[in-house]
Image (cartoon, rainbow, N blue to C red):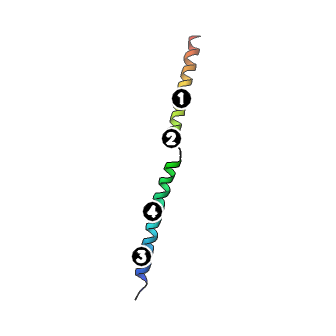
Amino acid sequence: MSDEPNEILAAAAAAKQHETAAKDAKAARQKRGWDLGKIGLGVGIGSAAIAAAVLFTRKKD
């Protein structure tokens, strides 16, 4: 009797555990973190609006 089937089953189980852990970690990271892309977009739009307002008010002087 060979040990190959046991090693294959053990490798498959380890791969499945690794995949499950990766999915859980990704879900946890998405729940706890801030979406920096949306924050950056908001800051950029806000900064552009302030700059436009300043330029507009100085243009009338």
Q: Mark 3 or mark 1, which has the lower sequence index?
A: 3
Closer mark to the observer between disc 4 and disc 2: 4
* Residue 60 screen position, x and y as percent: 56, 11
Q: Mark 2 or mark 3, which has the lower sequence index?
A: 3
Which residue sits at x=44%, y=78%? 7
Q: Mark 1 belongs to which amino acid?
A: Gly
Q: Quadrant of residue 50?
A: top right
Q: Mark 1 or mark 4, which has the lower sequence index?
A: 4
Q: Mark 3: few, some, or many residues within 10 Å (few <14, many ≥20)?
A: few
* Residue 35 screen position, x and y as percent: 51, 43
The residue most toward the bottom is: 1
Which image quarter is the N terminus in? bottom left
Which image quarter is the C terminus in? top right
Checking the image for residue 11, the label placed there is none
* Residue ID for mark 4: 20
Say what secondary structure mark 2 lies in.
helix
Which residue sits at x=46%, y=67%? 17
Which residue sits at x=56%, y=14%? 59
Above or below residue 39? Residue 47 is: above
